[in-house]
Amino acid sequence: MQPADLLIDNLATLASIDADGDFGVQHDAAIAIRNGHIEAVGPREEVLRAVQLADDAEVIDASGMSAVPGLVDCHTHIVYGGNRIHEFDLRAQGADYERIAAEGGGIKASVKLTREATDEALLAAATKRLARMRALGTTTAEVKSGYGLTAQDEARMLATAKAAGEAAGVRVTTTCLALHSTPPEAASPDAYVDYAIEEILPACAPLADAADVFLERGVFDVEQSRRFLEAARSHGLRLRLHADQFSEMGAIPLAIELAAASVDHLEATTDDGVKALAASNVIGVGLPVAALTLKRPMPPLRQLIDAGGRVALATDANPGSAPCLSLPTTMHLACTQMGLSCAEALAAATQGGAAVLGLDDTVGRLAVGYKADVVLVDDPDWRQLIAQLGAEPARVIRG
């Protein structure tokens, strides 16, 4: 028996997907940890019998607290320059996303500001955002590029994301979102897709885990997206799609065809799209903060779950349409606006997000052998983290 170096003792409750994939809540629980991994977890008496503690082991008395897995935010855009606070005010006065974009705001504005930002400014801002996300319970986060749109700037964004994750103590995976928008200097969307395939992907693939596209009217179509994603797959990258945010343009069939990891947004997905997605292995990622901010229909995660589909939740943290770093707030919206139970929301923001990132065998659960990512809630009922809008954990541990 190897000695544990950390014991989280006297937990009132512990909630998680277990090693068999079932959601469960255990009372009077404990978690024993060794070298950043869970050695034993479950009823307190069983854990204490199963392990011995090292002489210098840390013991956390979690009396009156509950524990859930470290949250996994599988869709964020937290590396960017400047801000777009004025767009929030414009939306408050009735302007919509597409009007703001057409007038030079939105993604185009962030591209300009990000290109102008120094390396030091980008890193400092991204580190601050990730540190705040960790304080709110996120221990693993995906970070996208997409505000550079040149080989140099896209690679700079990805390198910044990795450095910020190290500095903030958040496990970061990176995604090349070169097809986020057509930059102003491009001759046409098709010409930019050629450039993204020939120049951006080779520069970014060594720094990225996945590739993503914004398949939407006025942005990129199915054939442009297919070309880029097939090229990304040849570089060994996982595939993601921004899909059905404003219109159904064939993103779900393309995601299924290419065996993508996920389609994200889904505000405009119809019943046929739900059925197709539920019958596939592609995960539907709901981003309720963006839907709320842009006054769009909520993603149909309730229907997807009922149809047997796989789902995840993420913040979509970005400077315009989803200015939110909080997965607890995202889970609250999933329950109050989308009809998920607390258990379904927690599973989607932990195991679901981990599955999108290909990390579901190491994070997203409180189970033996998994990373010891633990969120402690200062309440005997774990659901308080979701029910109290804007709730913050008492402590966050990342193995």
Image (cartoon, grey):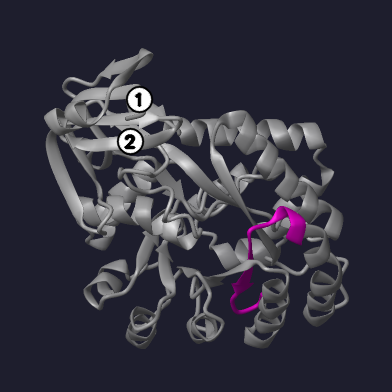
Using the numbered discs, state the Cα–Cα distance from disc 1 to disc 2 in whole angstroms: 7 Å
Q: Residue 251, how many percent across, how many down?
A: 53, 81
Residue denoted by label 2: 39
Q: Residue 5, how many percent across, how many down?
A: 38, 22
Q: Residue 206, how many percent across, how many down?
A: 76, 56
Report if the CB atoms under discs 1 and 2 are less than 8 Å apart.
Answer: yes
Residue denoted by label 1: 4
**Residue 147 higher or lower than 230, as above or below:** above
- At mark 1, the secondary structure is strand
**Residue 169 higher or lower than 100, as above or below:** above
Q: Is residue 126 visible?
A: no
Quadrant including the C terminus: top left
Indicate yes or no whether the magenta region holds residue 119.
no
User: Of the residues shown, which amino acid type is indicated by label 2?
Assistant: Glu
- Which span is picked out in magenta? 205-219
Residue at 29%, 47% (x, y): give it. Answer: 332
Q: Residue 315, how many percent across, how many down?
A: 46, 50
Q: Nearer the viewer, residue 87 or 206?
A: 206
